[in-house]
Amino acid sequence: MAAKHGMYMVTGGTFQHVEGGDLARFIGYPSADFGVLDYLVLNHLAIIVRGDAVGFDISLNAQDFDTRNLAAVIDHLAHSPGLIQVRIRMFLGGWLTEAFLDVEDAIARLRLVAEGGLRAPAARLRLVARDLDEPCAGTDGLRALWAAHRGRFSSDFMDDALGQGILDRTFVLEPGPRQGWLVRYMGAGIGTFDNWQQIGRPLATEQTDRGYTEWVASHYESVLASSGGRYDHVDAIISTNSRQPTRVRYRRRLLPFASLKGKPLVVGYSALSSDLALPL
């Protein structure tokens, strides 16, 4: 089977080579944008794929789909053993992306979708509290720095976090008397809401998902009352600036810190794990 490079729309079990403008004209849009792709996936049950020499990206609706399209994509992957990575962006309560380094694992996920084995979560905000001593490669770095700095937040702590490569998804929050939790630092890798990158701004604003921010704020409150913090697996469907909600799954460690002046802080690290194999 010939490799498929470029963008394709899979409808009726057939691959159709397209460009962004072609997709826009198909549904009467004046110009191409990302919303066109989502519209086709969610309303026309098409699967949109994009391939190159080493990777294959797939966008599909895992809640409502045409089994012929899934069968066609599965067949193509089965005859493409040279792929290094397959990414599947699926709508399942919200947009969720999984990356696979093994084609067979990607095929297994698509077969599970075709069999109706995946369901959108009944609740949009879910977590499972894990044992604090449970090893986690993604978040253990923060815990080690917390112990090394004895829970004191300082420029030395930030330097060490940068040196250990964990600053990108580290965040620092301070409880405020009037505006709730304030952002004191937000790693560049945390892009849930654009205004979270503005230091000193309240965590909850009109531009953020109030239900989500109030939910996580309750977790931060619990950390202030603890001696060892908390470690959770989180699955959340969040309303953002996108047309459709985003679904995020991550491992999160929260720890109680204090500034050099003694102000209470909560420092956290979240390791994204969008794969549906994350225990929850």
Image (cartoon, helix red, strand yellow):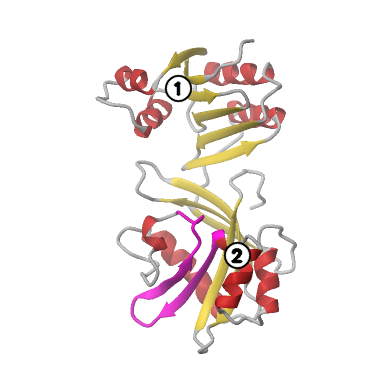
Q: Is residue 122 magenta?
A: no
Locate residue 183, reporting x and y percent. Answer: 43, 70
Disc 1 marks a residue whose amino acid type is Ala
Using the rendered view, name the quadrant where residue 225 is placed.
Answer: bottom right
Locate residue 192, reporting x and y percent. Answer: 44, 54
Q: Is residue 12 visible?
A: no
Q: Secondary structure at mark 1?
A: loop
Q: How many marks?
A: 2
Q: Secondary structure at mark 2?
A: helix
Q: CA distance from mark 2 to mark 1?
A: 43 Å
* Residue ID for mark 1: 46
Query: Residue visible at 45% across and 54% down?
Result: 191
Locate residue 264, reporting x and y percent. Answer: 51, 83
Q: Is residue 38 visible?
A: yes
- Circle 1 packing at 10 Å, graded few (<14), some (14-19), many (20+), is many
Task: Quarter of the image for the N terminus: give it.
Answer: top right
Locate residue 80, reporting x and y percent. Answer: 67, 19
Query: Residue visible at 51% across and 24% down?
Result: 49
Please indicate whether residue 46 sits to the left or right of residue 126 in the image: left
Q: Which numbered tag is attached to residue 162?
A: 2
- Mark 2 or 1: in front is 2
The residue most toward the bottom is 261
From the viewer's side, name the closer residue of 197 and 219: 197
Question: What span is colored magenta in the figure?
Answer: 168-191
Please indicate whether residue 231 sits to the left or right of residue 173 in the image: right
